[in-house]
Amino acid sequence: MNRPPLLALLSALFCFLILPVSGSAEEPHDDHCVVLVSIDGLAGFYLDDPKAELPTIRKLAADGVRADGMVCSFPTVTWPNHTTLVTGTEPGRHGVIGNNYLDRRSGEKIPLIPDPLFDKEQIVRTPTVYDVAHRAGLVTAGIIWPASRNARTLDWTVPDMGGEEAWPKYGTPYWMEELRRDGLPVDRHATWVREPAGGVQRDWLYTRLAGHLFEKHPPNLLMIHLVEVDHVEHKFGPRTPEAYWSVSHADDRVRDLVEFSKRSPFAQKTTFVIASDHGFFPIEQDIRPNVKLRQLGLVTGEGNKVTQKQAWCVAQGGACMVYVLDDERRDEIAARLKTELADVEGVQTVLAVDQFADHGLATPDEDERAPDLWLAAKSGYSFSESASGDAVVVPRSSKGGTHGYLPDQSDMLGTLIISGYGVRPGQKLGKVRSVDVAPTIARLLGLEMPTAEGRPLEAALDLE
């Protein structure tokens, strides 16, 4: 397994003591490798778009299976959906409820993205497929996987964090030293995170880290997150010339991963799972629900300087969390806001707590970080947290793109392709759910995930 002996011993002891029991009908496949590649923002519609140059990804689909779109978790943003991909559960259960949330006591927004405050064990409340694989004795690796800071069940890891100290502090120390000795520019990462076009270099580096693992520390499960498609689509919008360039760039990086995987002793038993965390909508208008709250007398202040909040909204792109902070009048205010906000231009729906379970969401009684209402916007609109001005809906200074919207809409569907060892080519998967990804990976590795809400995609598998 090529782990430093002390690291392997301590990791095995930790998992034996704390991880929940999960059964398996067969022995773990320690001669297999599953590579989960998340291409952030690669909407499912690109696979059938002739303008999208995706030769590697389309070949993987032709040689394996593909979904007709993947229904992701709500809100369709990065941190919740990457956690769904590896737990097989919705945010209401796994606990990563948004890219951020509001602390009801302080009234301040608490960031989950990009893991600035919390370790994985503090925010991910259900077992991940890498927890299960590690406990079974398999080698696990994560390259900038969201919500995995200090994950003790990742043998080889660098976190999805910027900053000069992030990788040195939270990356696997032995591996970081080895990467430097082997000439990989890991100490440039913090600089590239700060640069507007740094995602290009970052994705290039991440795939080279994967190549290093395949050759020197071959994993049984590797999770890698590619970022540039999402960056470009936020700035320019989907289906733009820039977006088509970015998906071509992502395809090149997948090509690199396929080539690098041939260095692994598990090359003949490697399966690629190409997934995304959400689709993308274009945006031209901003909805500012906190302006509406100010007009209703629930927010007091001058411009963006807020002095008192009886309620507050936290934006998640095309979704928005509405918190009622007046405990004595919570039900009354929430009922009023459900009506008032439903009438705002661009709002597609307002979800009250009795609808949360249908969307995989936790209620405030189940999780105090959860809001009292969720808003979802229509395509073309995005939520803003600004409380200044008189207009609730304003044109954006420039067009762009975002996500966060209700997931079961054609342009918000994600991508899923499974190709390689253990896959039955040519099967029709139809539309699938992102909660099915983790149990499918587990099955490919000879494991089971009884805690998952999804089910293995048996039609895709040929494991006899």
Image (cartoon, rainbow, N blue to C red):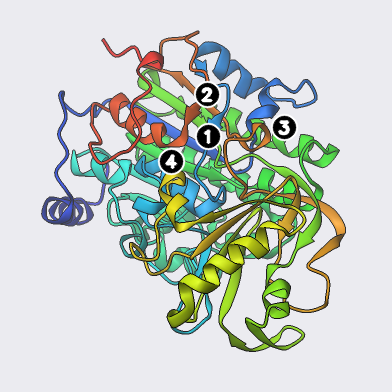
Q: Sequence order check: which comes first, mark 3 or mark 1?
A: 1
Which quadrant would the C terminus be assigned to in this image? top left
> Closer to us: mark 4 or mark 1?
1
In the picture of the structure, the residue carrying the numbered disc 2 is: 431
Q: Sequence order check: which comes first, mark 4 or mark 2?
A: 4
Report, in whole angstroms, how far the alpha carbon at label 3 lies from the one at label 2.
24 Å
Among the 4 quarters of the image, the one containing residue 1: top left
Q: Measured from the top left, where is residue 171 in percent x and y?
A: 41, 60
Give the residue type at disc 2. Answer: Lys
Does residue 457 lie above or below 235 as drawn? above
Q: Sequence order check: which comes first, mark 4 or mark 3?
A: 4
Callout 1: 10 Å neighbours few (<14), some, many (20+)? Answer: many
Residue drawn at x 48%, y 65% as measured from the top left: 371
Q: Measured from the top left, where is residue 143 in percent x and y?
A: 46, 48
Disc 1 is placed on an element classified as: strand
In the picture of the structure, the residue carrying the numbered disc 4 is: 85
> Closer to us: mark 4 or mark 3?
4
Callout 4: 10 Å neighbours few (<14), some, many (20+)? Answer: many
In the picture of the structure, the residue carrying the numbered disc 1 is: 71
Is residue 164 at all visible to an observer of this figure? Answer: no
Report, in whole angstroms, how far the alpha carbon at label 4 lies from the one at label 3.
23 Å
